[in-house]
Image: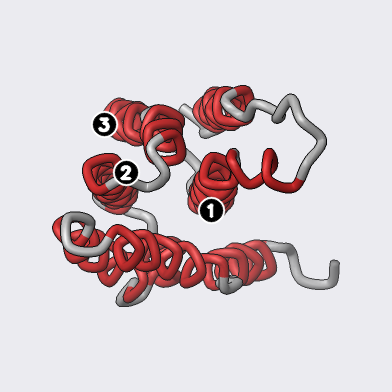
Amino acid sequence: MDTGRLEAFSDGVLAIIITIMVLDLRAPHEATVSALGSILPVLLGYVLSFVYVGIYWNNHHHMFHATEHVGGLTLWANLHLLFWLSLIPFATSWLGGTHFAARPAAIYGIVLLMSAIAYWMLQQSILRAPGGNPVLASALGKDLKGKISPAIYLIAIPMSFVSRWIACGLYVLVAVMWLIPDRRIEEKVIDKIEKQAPSGE
């Protein structure tokens, strides 16, 4: 089957995830700076999680832009990814609501780690499908960021019990790492389209 239905469903789920997170933000009843400061941890947690969901949406879009057809394994791998991403609002709420306490910070890291693993599994299901996906494989190359990110999460999770701020700083580091524009997949797709286009057009 083509990727349209999978992408539409995934976009809908990600939109709901962001909606759930923003509904957890409660405006203070007092019009003072100190009142705003009381919800700052919740706001910061929301911003970080919004960035993470945005990164997954962006990369998911580009990956399936380079994919023409999907099979049953890819559909299940995609649902597996969406399951872990759907836990981000819960982890975010607990993290912000407890002012970045150690256990919530560790759970937040576990959700991020499992989301990264699930994304890798989805990627592999596409690459190992019958016929493979040479465009995606060529674009990914060594995929250093994809390998470094889980390693950072594995450091940050136990670090939560030593210094929650270092742990959260590591989560921010991974987000910043992925925010740096990476047009590899987009460029490979454009190259493929140009090569397939009839000469003279």
Question: Vertical placement of 192 versus 50: above or below?
Answer: below
Q: Quadrant of residue 96?
A: top left
User: Which structural element holds mark 2?
Assistant: helix
Residue 127: give x, y in percent of width and height. Answer: 30, 53
**Whole-number angstrom distance, CA of label 2 to CA of label 3:** 27 Å
Q: Left or right of 111: which side holds 18?
A: right
Amino acid, disc 1 = Ile
Residue 58: give x, y in percent of width and height. Answer: 58, 51
Query: Counting residues from the N terminus, which is met first, the one under dot 3 or under dot 1?
Result: 1
Question: Vertical placement of 160 versus 89: above or below?
Answer: below
User: What mark, if any, has residue 108 been given in the picture?
Assistant: 2
- Residue at 35% across, 63% down: 165
User: Which structural element holds mark 3?
Assistant: helix
Front residue of this view, candidates 25 and 153? 25
Q: Residue furthest right?
A: 201
**Whole-number angstrom distance, CA of label 2 to CA of label 1:** 16 Å
How packed mark 1 is, by other alpha carbons closer than 10 Å (few <14, some 14-19, many 20 or more), is: some
Residue that label 3 marks: 73
Front residue of this view, candidates 163 and 113? 163
Amino acid, disc 2 = Tyr
Question: Vertical placement of 70 versus 194: above or below?
Answer: above
Q: Quadrant of residue 81?
A: top left
The reply to whether residue 125 is in sight is no
Front residue of this view, candidates 55 and 155? 155
- Residue at 44% across, 34% down: 97
Residue that label 1 marks: 55
**Callout in the foreground (2, 1):** 2
- Residue at 47% across, 72% down: 177
- Which quadrant would the C terminus be assigned to in this image? bottom right
Q: Left or right of 117: which side holds 44?
A: right
